[in-house]
Image (cartoon, rainbow, N blue to C red):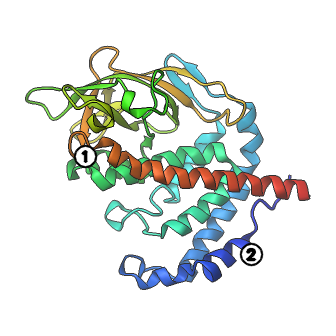
Amino acid sequence: MTQTLVNRRDIDFNLYEVLDAEALTQQDYYSDHSRETFTMALDAADQLAQELFWPKYQEFDQQECRLENGQAIVPAGLQEIWDALRDGGWFGAAGDYDMDGQQFPAVIHLACSMMFNAANTTATMYMGLTNGAAHLLHSFASDDLIEKFVRPMYAGKFGGTMCLTEPQAGTSLGDIETTATKVDGEDYYLICGTKRFISSGDHNLAPNIIHPVLAKIDGAPAGVKGISLFIVPKFRLNDDGSVGDSNDVITAGLEHKLGLKGQATAELKLGENDNCRGYLVGEENNGLKYMFKMMNGARIHTGLQATSLASTAYHCALQ
């Protein structure tokens, strides 16, 4: 197999000569960084991609995720990658210091993600969804919800997704049917509905998965104006923050795809037993506006995936 997946000279040229990424260090938020710290991160990502991600690429395209007793089981080698990303602080590389992140500029984080994607897109998606969901919830959730759910995501202790699509609605989000019913005297809503094509929707890499879910509160306006955003964990949390009982989030099935077979793309049933708790993020009926923060980020990452795979294909063909 080729040992060249991306052109580092080209990446460095674009970062420093075209985009002038070093100038970002003049901003207070990035003042602790320098070209040296950027290069250290890029070198570390390159090494991790080559030594850990790339040797498992073919394995993850041959081994499909499977469903056992309602639990998605991913290829065994993915756990080693998840643990390395968690222990290396990659989930929070672009996160704030107050979230125990490293406050790298997004452009540097994306350049590192390009190397990971070029070496193994399947594995990188598990981190990418978690990072994107954490960034979304950190932007709009209450301090209490951030402390409970977002901090562990930035630490790589919990996974994350984005739950928009439904079987009957597709991309027409105004037609979603997932409902949220306020429970009197409690800080949560009861969520009921089905979400489909949820990338990283279930897996055994982390003890909990946090789902940002779009739903309509009873009596909400019709169409997209009535959509709210909720945090729906796979498992509830105990008072001490440890993982507790099931939150009535059921994995009903996994998609069988032509590629990315090691990526668990799930159909999730929420509230089949009328016991799925969701926690409102921000204000009612503003959920789609909030979710666009993650959706727009996902568009950048989708383009990055295409560019990364094209780079890998080119260098393999060149060899």
Regarding residue 60, the answer to whether it shows in the image is yes
Q: Position of residue 197 (x, y in %)?
A: 53, 30
Q: Amino acid at mark 1?
A: Leu
- Residue 9: numbered disc: 2
Callout 1 secondary element: helix
Q: Residue furthest right?
A: 319
Q: Is residue 250 left or right of residue 75?
A: left
- Foreground: disc 1 or disc 2: 2
Q: Residue at x 80, y 62 (%)?
A: 4
Q: Residue at x 32, y 45 (%)?
A: 149
Q: Residue at x 82, y 60 (%)?
A: 3
Asked which quadrant contains residue 207, the reply is top left
Regarding residue 203, the answer to whether it shows in the image is no
Closer to the camera in the image, 272 or 158: 272
- Badge 1 crowding class, 10 Å Cα cut-off, few under 14, some 14 to 19, many 20 or more, is some
Q: Is residue 9 left or right of residue 111?
A: right
How far apart marks 1 and 2 lie (CA) works out to 42 Å
- Name the residue that disc number 1 marks: 145
- Tell me which numbered mark, 1 or 2, is placed earlier along the sequence: 2
Q: Position of residue 223 (x, y in %)?
A: 32, 32
Callout 2 secondary element: helix
Q: Residue at x 57, y 45 (%)?
A: 125
Q: Position of residue 127 (x, y in %)?
A: 53, 48
Asked which quadrant contains residue 112, the reply is bottom right
Q: Amino acid at mark 2?
A: Arg
